[in-house]
Amino acid sequence: MSHLDGHERDEQGRVEPRHTDDEVVEAVREHEPASTKEVGDALDIARQSADYRLRKLEEEGRVESKMVGNSLVWMLES
């Protein structure tokens, strides 16, 4: 049994995310500037999943990232 069993899939067989883009953006807003781990913890998803979602939202212009020291943090687009 894979870790994806039991998750909803779309017509193409892709796993549907448990959280909407708006929920991810709201997690950034609540912790801004938010680390990837903070967003993942807020949504109860793996850091890698949070990173993937945040990068997609950055491509769409909904969030932006910035290096602070050795860490990447996320903010709402200004």
Image: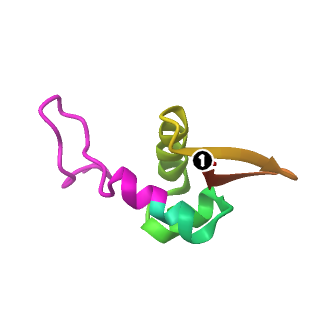
Residue 7, position as x, y percentages in the image: 22, 52
**How many marks do you count on the picture?**
1
Task: Decide if residue 6 is on the left or right side of residue 17.
Answer: left
Q: Residue furthest front?
A: 78
The percent coordinates of residue 1 (x first, y second) are 24, 51
Residue drawn at the location 11% of the way across and 32% of the way down: 11
48 and 33: which one is in front? 33
Residue depicted at 52% across the width and 46% down the height: 54
Task: Give the residues in magenta.
Answer: 1-25
**In the rendered image of this protein, does residue 27 appear above or below residue 78?**
below
Residue that protrudes farthest toward the right in the picture? 69
Does the magenta run of residues contain 64? no
Q: What residue type is labelled 1?
A: Glu
Position of residue 4 in the picture relative to residue 71 (left or right): left
Q: Which of 14 and 21 is in front in this view?
A: 21
Q: Where is residue 20 in the image (x, y as percent from the top left)?
A: 32, 54
Q: Residue furthest left?
A: 11
Confirm whether the magenta stretch covers residue 21: yes
Q: Kindly identify the residue that appears in the image at 47 percent across and 34 percent down.
A: 60
Q: Where is residue 2 in the image (x, y as percent from the top left)?
A: 29, 48
The quadrant in which residue 24 appears is bottom left
Q: Mark 1 points at which residue?
A: 77
Q: Which colour scheme is used?
A: rainbow
Q: Is residue 74 rendered to the left or right of residue 7?
A: right
SS for callout 1: loop
As drawn, 48 above or below 45: above
Mark 1 neighbour class, 10 Å CA radius: few under 14, some 14 to 19, many 20 or more: few
State the predominant SS element of the stretch in magenta.
loop
Task: Please give the name of the residue rendered at 49% of the width and 70% of the height, measured from the top-left corner.
Answer: 42
Above or below: residue 35 compared with residue 44: above
